[in-house]
Image: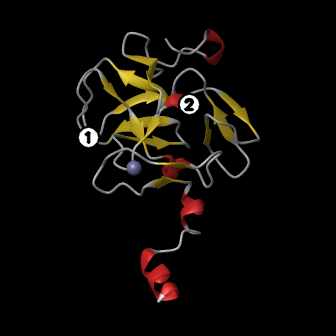
């Protein structure tokens, strides 16, 4: 179990034999790897952690004023604009969006949970629909579409 015993013993909690927080590379830092092959649509784990009232580097947003601080598992999911997992912050579950081969990193879309990111950053996920910049879902509303920029500039 990746979570300490104080969080309980939910059978859906991630097992240390299936998942691990590992250092990926300098650009990404740490990420969560799955040693087990996962099937599309499967609930692959339940998240836990400390519920706090402020946003921090590795928190996940539950509601306007609640954030999950999980330094054991979900706080280290990497970002991709084509994620392979989806997070349900009400049921605290993680679902596979596609078949995931063993020894793969788990990627969420940070805009799925976050209204605003603790720190926005340029994206280099390499997917064909990469947004190029990673912000929360409300950060994106402030982005100026390219078309508007062209009109303003011309
Ligand atoms: Zn991207």
User: What residue is shown with label 1?
Assistant: 98
Identify whether 105 is placed above or below 11.
Answer: below
Q: Position of residue 39 (x, y in %)?
A: 24, 32
Identify whether 11 is placed above or below 124.
Answer: above
Q: Count neighbours of disc 2 (C-alpha within 10 A) and say few if under 14, some if 14 to 19, many if 20 or more.
A: many
Front position in the image: 34 or 126: 126
Q: Is 147 on the left-hand or right-hand side of 5?
A: left
Residue drawn where x is 23% and y is 35% of the image: 99
Residue drawn where x is 56% and y is 20% of the image: 72
Q: For the image shown, how many numbered marks are present on the structure?
A: 2
Q: Position of residue 79 (x, y in %)?
A: 44, 41
Distance in Å between CA atoms under marks 1 and 2: 21 Å
- Residue furthest front in the image: 154
Q: Is mark 2 within 8 Å of ligand 1?
A: no
Identify whether 76 is placed above or below 19.
Answer: below
Q: Count neighbours of disc 1 (C-alpha within 10 A) and say few if under 14, some if 14 to 19, many if 20 or more.
A: some
Quadrant of residue 8 within the rendered picture: top right
User: What residue is shown with label 2?
Assistant: 75
Quadrant of residue 37 within the rendered picture: top left
- Residue furthest right in the image: 53
Residue drawn where x is 25% and y is 31% of the image: 100
Front position in the image: 59 or 81: 81
What is the secondary structure assignment of the residue under circle 1? loop
Question: Mark 1–mark 2 contact, CB under 8 Å?
Answer: no
Q: Earlier in the sequence, mark 1 or mark 2?
A: 2
């Amino acid at each position: 179990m990746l979570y300490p015993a104080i969080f309980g013993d939910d059978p859906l909690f991630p097992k240390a034999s299936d998942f691990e927080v590992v250092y990926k590379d300098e650009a990404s830092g740490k990420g969560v790897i799955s040693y087990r092959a996962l099937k599309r649509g499967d609930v692959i784990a339940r998240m836990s952690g400390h519920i706090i009232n402020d946003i921090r580097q590795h928190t996940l947003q539950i509601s306007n004023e609640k954030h999950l601080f999980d330094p054991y598992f979900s706080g280290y999911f990497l970002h991709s604009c084509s994620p392979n997992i989806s997070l349900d912050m009400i049921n605290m579950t993680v679902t596979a969006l596609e078949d995931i081969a063993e020894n793969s990193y788990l990627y969420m879309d940070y805009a799925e949970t976050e209204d605003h990111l603790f720190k926005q950053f340029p994206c280099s996920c390499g997917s064909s629909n990469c947004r190029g910049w990673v912000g929360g879902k409300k950060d994106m509303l402030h982005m100026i579409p390219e078309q508007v920029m062209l009109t303003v500039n011309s």
